[in-house]
Amino acid sequence: MEKKIALVTGANRGIGFEVARQLAAADFHVILAARDKTKGKEAARKIQADDMVLDVTSYESIANLAKEVKNKYGGLDVLVNNAGVMMGESKKMTQVTKEEIEQSVCTNALGPLFMTNALLDSLNPHAQVVMVSSGFGEMCVGFSSYAPLYSATKTFLNAITRHLAQALQSKSVYVNAVCPGWVRTDMGGKHASRSVKKGTETIVWLAKGKAGDVSGKFFRDQKEISW
Ligand code: NAP
């Protein structure tokens, strides 16, 4: 049987790398996308993945990658939109700079939308698109004052997830969001409560199609949570 093909963004370190590692170990053909060519190559070498250069804030970079994916692989079974930044963490919404706003929105929300749309023709039937979101994006429960700009970009990403899920229903492409919990990475810091392995569990579970044909949902610990 041919290997399933999975692409993970921001996969040179942190959650993205661990997702790529686990999918490669589960016999997926993994494309590890990173914005720094050298770091991407080095990370891909460790897990025997292919590497591609991708800056999710550059539409040109996204379009180049989409073209390369189509030419080289034909189709994709999994797209994990993982790349993310947290900027202006301790600032109120009135204090964040124009640069912080643009970089955060472009990376955390528009990047996953542009990536999914650019790769539409390459997404095989029953492909899984996983958006790495955050509980800080929730609006119904647990609304917090922490990192307002970051939180708002994840709320935007959650809305994008639901609309993409609806738009891709007829193509049988499934789009879901995941909160990994508070994870010990460069972003989460060393005091975070979860290991990287624990933080990636639900992402990998969705990527492997273990949740079935579910789409337009938000998950933590393999359970649906509220938006
Ligand atoms: P991390 O260790 O800081 O890694 C972030 C990754 O995103 C790096 O590979 C980074 O690449 C990449 N990246 C940033 N901007 C990019 C861009 N413009 N184009 C391409 N790649 C870019 O963070 P993490 O904890 O693994 O976070 C991964 C995802 O999980 C993020 O979406 C984050 O919001 C989410 N999340 C994390 C936590 C947590 O507690 N850690 C909790 C909830 C959600 P460089 O190495 O080049 O900078």
Image (cartoon, rainbow, N blue to C red):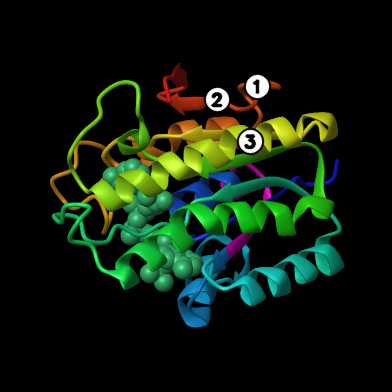
Instruction: Give residue 41's position: percent from left, percent from top.
Output: 54, 75
Q: Residue at x 83, y 35 (%)?
A: 171
Please tell me how crowded label 3 is: few (under 14), some (14-19), or many (20+) other residues with Cα within 10 Å. few
Q: Quadrant of ligand 1?
A: bottom left
Helix, strand or loop at label 3? It is helix
Q: CA distance from mark 1 to mark 3?
A: 14 Å
**Looking at the rendering, in which quadrant would you find the C terminus?**
top left
At label 2, the amino acid type is Lys
Q: Is residue 47 above or below residue 226?
A: below
The residue lying furthest to the front in this view is: 94
Dots 1, 2 in contact, CB < 8 A: yes
Q: Is residue 211 above or below residue 138?
A: above
Q: Which residue is mark 2?
A: 217
Left or right side of 223 for 51: right
Q: Is residue 116 above or below residue 62?
A: above
Dots 3, 2 in contact, CB < 8 A: no
Q: CA distance from mark 1 to mark 2?
A: 7 Å
Left or right side of 134 for 218: right
Query: Which badge, 1 or 3, comes first in the chain's sequence?
Result: 3
Q: Residue at x 22, y 48 (%)?
A: 147
**Looking at the rendering, in which quadrant would you find the N terminus?**
top right
Q: Which residue is mark 3?
A: 163
Q: Which residues are magenta?
A: 24-32
Left or right side of 148 for 162: right
Query: Which badge, 3 or 2, comes first in the chain's sequence?
Result: 3
Q: Which residue is mark 1?
A: 214
Instruction: Give residue 183's position: percent from left, percent from top.
Output: 28, 43
